[in-house]
Image: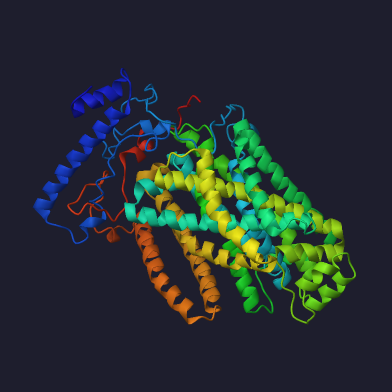
Amino acid sequence: MPTNDAQIKQHLSSGRGCFNSDIVAQYQSQCLESLSEQNMKTKKSEGSAPCELVNVAHPKESKLTVTPDTMSDQSYQQLDESGSGDHGSKPDLSDIPDPEVEGEPFTSYFDEKVPIPEDEKNSLFSFRKLWAFTGPGFLMSIAYLDPGNIESDLQSGSVAGFKLLWVLLAATIIGLLLQRLAARLGVVTGLHLAEVCNRQYPKVPRILLWIMVEMAIIGSDMQEVIGSAIAINLLSVGIIPLWGGVLITIVDTFFFLFLDKYGLRKLEAFFGFLITIMAVTFGYEYVRVRPDQGQLLKGMFFPYCADCGNAQVLQAVGIVGAVIMPHNMYLHSALVKSREVNRANKKDVREANKYFFIESSLALFVSFIINVFVVAVFAEAFYEKKNNDVLNECMNSTFSGQSRSLFPNNNDTLNVDLYKGGVILGCFFGAPALYIWAVGILAAGQSSTMTGTYSGQFVMEGFLNLKWSRFARVVLTRSIAITPTLLVAIFQDVQHLTGMNDFLNVLQSLQLPFALIPVLTFTSMKSVMNDFANGLGWKIAGGILILIICCINIYFVIIYVSALGNLGLYIGAAILSVAYLCFVAYLTWQCLVALGLKFLECGQTLPVPLVDINGYNLGLINYPELFLLHNMEKEGISSSR
């Protein structure tokens, strides 16, 4: 085995021997020791900087050892020759075999990668290539169609009519731009967002970030399980209780999650089938109700809200919170890894980014149309309806027994949710409308439950480097989400179960900064993205969009907490708010440094973190393994797949 730095470099570049993890680890260790000595000399000669902990320390346990987790993709087996960001001549590592390491190779939800066909005839755009890249975007778009979004849609229509459709359109477009950043991060680095956070943030912020994202996933899972349970209860005409629907959701989730064993493309086709079911069922309701197309187009393209009050403003804020979901950033950055992209070639990376963006645009367009169906149905049929109007109509239908307990005989404005929405459709448009509505909700709940479980797996693997079996990971993530939902379903009625959605929306709104800030931070860092880092326009636009979204959601949380009317809850919320804002401020500080405000850096940026006497680091860490793109081929050189 080579013993010094020169021999190691020669061994890596020659390709004669086995490129194993011990050699790489030894080389990285020598780089670390060399940089440590240089830093100690610098400290002795220049003295300590006022903020020296920002970039010059790291926990001792974070040793740069190469494992299947730290070098999970073939492209990360190409180390920078100097380890310090030198962009000069690089050794040819193209013939080096894969490292031989013990343990199961890292896989996400896939054990295979979809090959991308060559199409020399159509260099600018190829439908064959678009079809090969189609899949991840549609799985991502399911989060825009989960039961929480459907409930937000029907409430928007019943509260504000067509007036808030432009908010839904704007939120979807903003969501597309943010999803673009997440997808680019996964394509360019070969790591999803949780893995990059694990490598870049120090230990304590990393753990806090994981906890926050897990809370968002749990909240989303609970909404999805609630939606599925309500759909099963409606389809069975109340024979299957809500807690029974929750248990059925647990069982069929396990069944569906193992469909990927039959092939990645078959799994993606199954999700496409569920989206088709939602389009057909909610489209049927749209055709049956026949909304006013002029009012629909006016509400979609003219940003106005005449005669809107506090209820309409809160509903608009709720739309933004329901559409842009934190765990979806982590999910999308992982899903794009399912395609064979030669990340050592800039042309291939650029092409993958283009086709993934086109596919995501198509997927979110489909999800937007489905959401419009739901808003338009309830805007046309139930806007400004009173409880006694609905009760009188339902008393003349086959749902008279259910309606007495759901709609009080008063002149208050109708308040709807997923369950009431189905009953109302049945009262006004017949039993088929109710059952078709329930089928659509069930498809939304099942599809989003499965993608939520994948998100939980990606986040757990990325942040904690856990090598659990698929079954164990699913059991843990399902148990955390389903246990509280099951307890509420057993001991409370459907009103309390659907009422949980308000609290869960607040919970997810609070977690948005912990997905949006990191994705903007890392896609703006040249040490991570190299030539694909965000330009000035994207940095400014991304920063403004994230600031607006976070402010909107914090306003939503403040309104919700102020309505609780409990002094103890106010005090508890104030204490938690201080800790919450401190952590958001820390992430914002690192993001501003990545965006180019170097005067906030308070220290010297190093390619490898140095261990300080205190053994801790407060700033971002640039690992040598993230310098992949420094070894990229020229764009004109074609790559073999």
Asked whether residue 629 is in view, the answer is yes
Residue farthest to the right, as pictured: 396
Residue farthest to the top, as pictured: 16
Asked whether residue 368 is in view, the answer is no
Q: Is residue 401 left or right of residue 167?
A: right
Tell me what residue is drawn at x 56 percent, y 42 percent. 356
Q: Total label count?
A: 0
Tell me what residue is drawn at x 27 percent, y 28 percent. 23
Q: Is residue 594 above or below residue 18?
A: below
Image coloring type: rainbow
Q: Nearer the viewer, residue 301 or 4?
A: 4
Locate residue 109, reporting x and y percent: 54, 38
Tell me what residue is drawn at x 31 percent, y 45 percent. 622
Q: Nearer the viewer, residue 240 or 613?
A: 240
Q: Is residue 567 left or right of residue 362?
A: left
Tell me what residue is drawn at x 61 percent, y 50 percent. 449
Q: Is residue 8 above or below residue 310?
A: above
Q: Is residue 301 above or below residue 232?
A: below
Q: Is residue 111 left or right of residue 25?
A: right
Question: Which of the 4 image quarters holds residue 259?
Answer: top right
Locate residue 421, reporting x and y percent: 75, 64
The N terminus sits in image quarter: top left
Q: Nearer the viewer, residue 351 or 201?
A: 201
Q: Is residue 36 left or right of residue 399?
A: left
Q: Is residue 209 above or below residue 192?
A: below
Locate residue 105, reporting x and y percent: 44, 31
Locate residue 537, reporting x and y percent: 46, 55
Residue farthest to the left, as pictured: 45
Q: Nearer the viewer, residue 324 or 294?
A: 324
